[in-house]
Image (cartoon, rainbow, N blue to C red):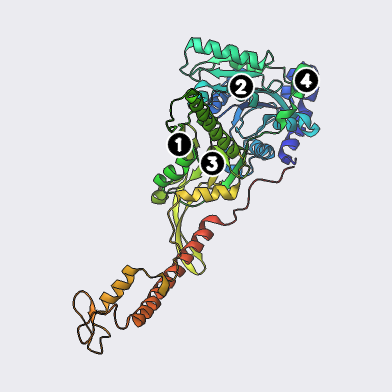
């Protein structure tokens, strides 16, 4: 990893001035005053990680040192990997003028593997000289655990509160009763063991003594904690991943909610996300009644069980299909078709809510843009430095598939129509051609009696005497109109692609 020169040059200058004083201090104190001190706050979505980080930052007065919070703006990290997070963090150090001895509280995005982050900062000699990992704090909100019907608490602990990594687990009861909290706290304690200290809080109210314990922690680099980390090699590779997808098309809000958010999270069935819970809520078709016999009850029960197994097998096959993205969370910076001049919005989509908020400090400006010698008007946004698009979190994420899916939420562009031929005309179209030309081409005494065409002698004719010529003229005229419309549709599509898409190559870097 290539760190910003600012970090190491500033570190070298500060180190020389305090090296002699640090030599007489205890190891833990000298390490803090001669390095950048890092506290990672991790946890699942909607756990209150940012609130906890801000609470830690307010402890700076008591601590007598500067505490800053780094919460990655997801749209500013098009490569949201462990390396991408570290690179963005180092840029933040320079922008925020972080100095040696300062404390930085890092809100870890859920798609990042904390084991890999620790390996970068604690396993690389260049970084261990500069950075001191003070604590990893896991925050879990019980309301978030159950709102998405995921009752597997141990999965959350395995993913976030790993022994050897997390020193603290803060369990926010939210509105859960004391008895339920006692039961879950005991269960969680049994799972995580004694190496992780568990604290119970309510409604984001983290006590001062908990904050003090986090800043006073000296266990991260102990031999016992290192041994715990070495026991967890299988978590170095995370099953879930995150990918940032550039998407500049304006959204039609109602269409986006119905066809994108609805398909992802509300229907619970579809190509994008299937929940294990779905297998428990299957509505089986009624089994046809059979003649009552000695074994009829047993046969009915067996057939029902077989149908359940078949349905679960179908779900498992989809879950295991690597060509189908499984999205569990998405966050995007978007604009709306009918509100282009209202600014930009941050939207959050997950299993239990859709949320949006306007992005402050952004000024919409109408600008004329020339594309293929055609001048079009678009709205740009001064004050916004990032990319419009979405961060998706899940499994088997494919950017092209995700872009195609997001386009369901944009204004429908005109599509090209097929040219007409004599064989493609409907009977209704042919009848209309005849009626529109009922007074044309009747050169040999033919006439139209209001119902059918007749010859000179009054005998009914099967069709207009010059129907073939009329059809040929009609097809030629219609195809000229269709060709003009198709060229216009193709032009609009190309302009939209050049205006909104550009290069949609994957922003996910190759595996290192």
**How much space separates mark 1 and mark 2, taking CA atoms?**
25 Å
Residue beneath disc 3: 272
Can you give x and y, in whole percent of width and height, for residue 509 in the image? 68, 46
Mark 4 crowd level (few <14, some 14–19, many ≥20, 10 Å Cα): few
Work out whether residue 309 can be spotted. yes
Work out whether residue 277 can be spotted. no
Can you give x and y, in whole percent of width and height, for residue 52 in the image? 55, 23
The quarter holding residue 420 reads: bottom left
Residue beneath disc 2: 154
Of badges 3 and 4, the one in the foreground is 3
Of badges 2 and 4, the one in the foreground is 2
Q: Are marks 2 and 4 in contact (CB under 8 Å)?
A: no
Residue beneath disc 4: 227
Q: Are marks 3 and 2 in contact (CB under 8 Å)?
A: no
Q: Residue at x 64, y 27 (%)?
A: 159
**How much space separates mark 2 and mark 4, taking CA atoms?**
21 Å
Left or right of 429 on screen, residue 59: right
Mark 1 crowd level (few <14, some 14–19, many ≥20, 10 Å Cα): some
**How much space separates mark 4 and mark 1, taking CA atoms?**
43 Å
Residue beneath disc 1: 266
Which quadrant is the N terminus positioned in? top right
Along the line of sight, the residue nearer the viewer: 166 or 423? 423
Instruction: State which tag comes first along the sequence, 3 or 4.
Output: 4
Instruction: State which tag comes first along the sequence, 3 or 2.
Output: 2
Determine whether 212 is above or below 454 in the image: above
Q: Residue at x 63, y 40 (%)?
A: 80
Q: Residue at x 71, y 25 (%)?
A: 133
Instruction: State which tag comes first along the sequence, 4 or 1.
Output: 4
**How much space separates mark 1 and mark 3, taking CA atoms?**
11 Å
């Amino acid at each position: 990893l290539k760190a910003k020169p600012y970090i190491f040059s500033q570190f070298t200058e500060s180190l020389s001035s305090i090296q002699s004083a640090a030599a007489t201090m205890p190891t833990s104190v000298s390490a803090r005053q001669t390095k950048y001190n890092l506290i990672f706050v991790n946890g699942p979505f909607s756990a209150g990680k940012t609130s906890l980080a801000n609470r830690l930052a307010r402890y700076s007065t008591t601590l007598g040192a500067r505490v800053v919070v780094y919460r990655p703006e997801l749209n500013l990290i098009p490569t949201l990997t462990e390396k991408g997070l570290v690179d963005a963090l180092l840029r933040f150090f320079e922008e925020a003028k972080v100095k040696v001895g300062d404390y930085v509280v890092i809100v870890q995005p859920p798609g990042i593997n904390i084991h890999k982050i620790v390996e970068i900062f604690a396993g690389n000699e260049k970084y261990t000289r500069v950075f001191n990992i003070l604590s990893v704090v896991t925050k879990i909100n019980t309301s978030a655990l159950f709102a998405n019907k995921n009752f597997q608490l141990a999965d959350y602990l395995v993913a976030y509160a790993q022994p050897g990594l997390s020193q603290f687990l803060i369990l926010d009861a939210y509105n859960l009763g004391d008895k339920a909290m006692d039961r879950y706290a005991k269960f969680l304690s049994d799972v995580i063991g004694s190496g992780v200290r568990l604290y119970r809080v309510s409604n984001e109210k983290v006590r001062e003594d908990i904050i003090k314990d986090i800043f006073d922690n000296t266990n991260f680099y102990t031999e016992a904690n290192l041994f715990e980390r070495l026991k967890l090699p299988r978590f170095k590779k995370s099953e879930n991943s995150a990918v940032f997808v550039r998407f500049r098309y304006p959204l039609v809000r109602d269409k986006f909610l119905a066809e994108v958010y609805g398909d992802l999270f509300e229907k619970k069935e579809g190509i994008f996300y299937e929940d294990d819970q779905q297998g428990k809520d299957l509505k089986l078709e009624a089994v046809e009644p059979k003649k009552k016999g000695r074994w009829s009850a047993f046969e009915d029960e067996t057939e029902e069980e077989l149908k359940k197994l078949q349905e679960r097998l179908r779900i498992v096959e989809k879950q295991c299909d690597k060509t189908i993205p499984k999205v569990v969370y998405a966050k995007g910076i978007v604009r709306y078709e009918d509100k282009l001049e209202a600014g930009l919005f941050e939207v959050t989509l997950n299993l239990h809510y859709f949320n949006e908020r306007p992005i402050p400090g952004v000024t919409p400006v109408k600008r004329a843009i020339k594309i293929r010698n055609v001048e079009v008007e678009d709205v740009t946004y001064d004050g916004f430095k990032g990319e419009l698009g979405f961060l998706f979190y899940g499994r088997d994420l494919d950017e092209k598939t995700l872009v195609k899916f997001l386009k369901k939420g944009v204004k429908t562009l005109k599509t090209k129509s097929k040219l007409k031929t004599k064989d493609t005309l409907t009977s209704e179209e042919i009848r209309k051609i005849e009626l529109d030309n009922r007074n044309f081409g009747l050169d040999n005494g033919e006439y139209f009696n209001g119902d059918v065409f007749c010859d000179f002698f009054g005998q009914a004719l099967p069709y207009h005497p010059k129907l073939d010529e009329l059809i040929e003229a009609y097809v030629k005229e219609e195809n000229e109109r269709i060709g003009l419309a198709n060229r216009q549709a193709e032009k609009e599509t190309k302009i939209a692609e050049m205006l909104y898409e550009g290069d949609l190559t994957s922003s996910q870097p190759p595996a290192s």
